[in-house]
Image (tube, grey):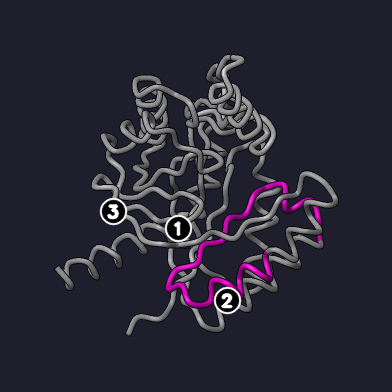
Amino acid sequence: MQAPTICIALHDVAPATWPQCERLLAAIDEVAPMAVTLLVVPRWHGDRVDANSARGRSWHARLESRRARGDELALHGWRHLDDAPLPSWSWRPTTWRHALGERIKRRFYTAGEGEFAALDTAHAAQRLANGLAWFNAYGWRPNGFVAPAWMLGEHAWQAVSAAPFAWTTSWRHFWLMPERRSVVAPCITASARSYWRRTSSQAWMRAYACATTRHPIVRLGLHPADATYPSLIRAWQRLIGHLLEQRIPKTKSELALHLRAQMHETA
């Protein structure tokens, strides 16, 4: 029987966040060298990196060095900013509740970074095409896509289904694409935005790891901001060490291949 799996993804990978990303990757290596999935944002918060510029060539070399050691690159949005219009207010109770819920979710919970939460199909498809073209300019082809903050509206879902991706993920599930066939694969993550979030995150990480013991797949989602706080780095290292005692690491594309093989065997 296949051993349970752990998938580690590093979110928000971009030139501006790379120093923090390197600290987290080094922290993982201190526990055990393993291949991880790097979720790359081509135009992080509007930052433009031309593939033919000196900065672009340096960026290419850094990611190539990670690919050479087994890491994979996946597309993680285009700008990582939610710039779609918010729903308008109305005094009708159902509309008002919807507008309030959307504003809380898209502006407070995700800090305005759920880029694909409210895009229509055409705009979502264009951003995916932009991202794929950016990867192609560097000579890369991403197998997977992860929406920023895992927020993927139904119209954006249609665009992702039509794009050439083998997998995507939500917070709770791993999806094989384009058929949108899913398996439960909960993700453990932390929030570094305030002291109380960091403190509660560490307790949550431990509790959630215990609660997911029965799941064959557990994912870890690290973010560059985690690297700012040594306590969070240590918490991640403890958790990774604990999970590796009973789980084998895979990149997300390796997991997708394994799941497809399993489904073929049981078909």
**Image mark count:** 3
Position of 243 relative to 142 (above/below): below
Quarter the N terminus occupies: bottom left
Tell me which corner region of the image, top left, top right, bottom left or bottom right, holds residue 154: top left
Q: Residues within 10 Å of mark 2 (few under 14, many from 20)?
A: some
Residue 84, x across and y down, in percent? 53, 19
Q: Is residue 123 magenta?
A: no
Asked whether, in this view, residue 96 is left or right of residue 174, the answer is: right
Q: Residue at x 63, y 27 (%)?
A: 100
Label 1 vs 3, first from the N-terminus? 1
Location of residue 168 in the rendering, given as x and y in whole percent from the top left corner:
39, 48
Rendered image: mark on residue 68? 1
Q: Amino acid at mark 1?
A: Ala
Label 3 Cα crowd, 10 Å radius (few <14 / some 14-19 / many 20+): few
Helix, strand or loop at mark 2: helix
Residue with the mark numbered 2? 243
Residue 90 vs 198, above or below: the answer is above
- Foreground disc of the pair 1, 3: 3
Which residue: 62% across, 67% down?
A: 208
* Residue 46 in view: no
Read off the residue under disc 3. Answer: 181
State whether residue 151 is above or below residue 184.
Answer: above
Q: Give the number of the mark in front: 2 or 1.
A: 2
Q: Residues within 10 Å of mark 1 (few under 14, many from 20)?
A: few
Disc with the residue nearer the chain's start (2 vs 3): 3
Q: Quadrant of residue 120?
A: top left
